[in-house]
Amino acid sequence: MDPLQTPPAAPFEPRPNWWSRNWKWVVPTGCFSIIVLILIFVFAIVLFVFGMLKSTDVYKTAVASAKNNPEVIEALGSPIKEGMLVGGKTNIEGSSGEADLSIPISGPKGKGTIYVMAKKSAGRWNFETMEVEVHQTKNRINIAPTTTLETDDESEQEE
């Protein structure tokens, strides 16, 4: 073999296409992106539903009654803050409806839950139950207003 002779050329291998080169990072990234988008969508729906519950007159009245009740302030301290996860349902159709809510609240001294059951008839909310259960003592404090709550039907949003 002649030392000045060039070695034979290596067989030509075509460059792999883009997918062959990148699938190992594209597939996991794509799956992760889809999962993140689904989670964002679910989170947005949950926020919307809780926002609708928190915008009702029943919710606002219950929280205001708890924040202004001396027995609740004594048990939980001041300021009283609303929790994020409201439970229950509201069903409003025109001038009638019903609401059944449980609203978590907390203060510097402890935590509690506001339980509200109300019926709306002829544009007025009548509260069957509105009480705060203090978690530490399991004591229930009645915070129901002495009058019915009259609402403007257009301001109430259907849940």
Image (cartoon, helix red, strand yellow):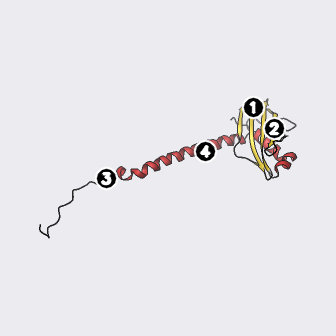
Q: Secondary structure at mark 4?
A: helix
**Residues under labels 2 and 3: Cα distance?**
70 Å
Determine crowd level at label 3: few under 14, some 14-19, many 20+ residues with C-alpha closer than 10 A. few
Q: Give the residue drawn at x 72%, y 34%.
A: 90
Q: Which residue in the structure is indicated by mark 2?
A: 130
Query: Which mark is first along the chain, 4 or 2?
Result: 4
Which of discs 4 and 1 lies nearer the camera? The answer is: 4
The label shown at residue 98 is 1
- Residue 57 visible in image: no
Q: Is residue 114 above or below residue 81?
A: above
Q: Quadrant of the N terminus?
A: bottom left
Q: Which residue in the structure is indicated by mark 4?
A: 43
Q: Are marks 1 and 3 in contact (CB under 8 Å)?
A: no
42 relative to 22 in the view: left or right? right
Q: Give the residue drawn at x 78%, y 41%.
A: 114
Determine crowd level at label 4: few under 14, some 14-19, many 20+ residues with C-alpha closer than 10 A. few
Query: Which mark is first along the chain, 3 or 4?
Result: 3
Query: Which mark is first along the chain, 1 or 4?
Result: 4
Q: Percent from the top left, x then y, of residue 86?
A: 71, 41
32 relative to 93 in the view: left or right? left
